[in-house]
Image (tube, rainbow, N blue to C red):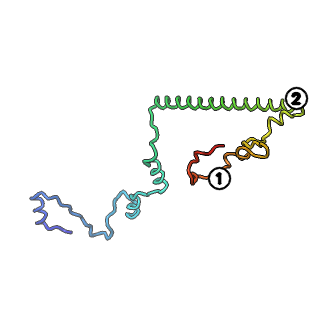
Amino acid sequence: MKLSPTLISLASVFQIPIRIRVILSSSSTPPQAPFSTSSPFLARKALQNKVDKRITLIRYHLNHPAIPRPLRFSRLRALRHWTIHRAAQLHLHNTRRREEMELERQYNSMRAACEELRVGLDDGGRLYRQATTRKGLFGGIKMEKEVVGNGGVPIEYARAQVDGPPRGGWDHGWTR
């Protein structure tokens, strides 16, 4: 758009800023920036943000409100935190190892006692067989052709194991 000299003088009197675009009539192509060697289409496309779905997902899960923020400590506080955490882990490890060693000691002692009963006595292993028998283990004691108790059935098998409670609720009168 070409402005008349009258409009230009009025704009200067009333201090209205105007922009005049200079159109070069000698060249048929629009002027390009002298520092760019790429076409305007490629330059516009480069300005657009390229969204990578993987980065978006990572950012979403890192900054999700359900996930607490990572701990950010100063050097001394981080060293203090690591030292306390490592000491706690060592204590747990030592406690577990101590318990495991105690169980192993008990197991070895029982195994040695059973071996002594089986071989060490001159009764042919009778005491060992009596000590390791499983007859009547679950309460099925026979008294003159009658079974007292639950008949040798483990209490876990008295009712089918299901996720929900029984229909009748708790049986307060039940005894073994």
Q: Residue at x 24, y 64 (%)?
A: 22
Q: Residue at x 80, y 39 (%)?
A: 133
Q: Residue 97 in the image: x percent, y percent?
A: 66, 31
Q: Residue 39 in the image: x percent, y percent?
A: 39, 63
Observer-nearest of 13 and 164: 164
Report the residue marked by disc 2.
Answer: 121
Q: Residue 107 in the image: x percent, y percent?
A: 74, 32
Q: Which secondary structure lies at badge 1?
A: loop
Is disc 1 in contact with disc 2, using a CB cutoff of under 8 Å? no
In primary-sequence order, the first of circles 1 and 2 is 2
Q: Residue at x 48, y 32 (%)?
A: 78
The N terminus lies in which quarter of the figure? bottom left
Q: Is residue 126 left or right of residue 33?
A: right
Disc 1 vs disc 2: which is toward the camera? 1
Q: Residue at x 53, y 32 (%)?
A: 85
Q: Is residue 142 left or right of residue 82?
A: right
Q: Is residue 105 left or right of residue 41?
A: right
Mark 1, other Cα within 10 Å: few <14 / some 14–19 / many ≥20: few
Q: Is residue 35 above or below residue 114?
A: below
**Mark 2: amino acid:** Leu
Mark 2, other Cα within 10 Å: few <14 / some 14–19 / many ≥20: few
**Mark 1: amino acid:** Ala
Q: Residue 144 in the image: x percent, y percent?
A: 79, 44
Q: Point out the residue furthest to the front here.
A: 144
Observer-nearest of 7 and 158: 158
Report the residue marked by disc 1.
Answer: 160
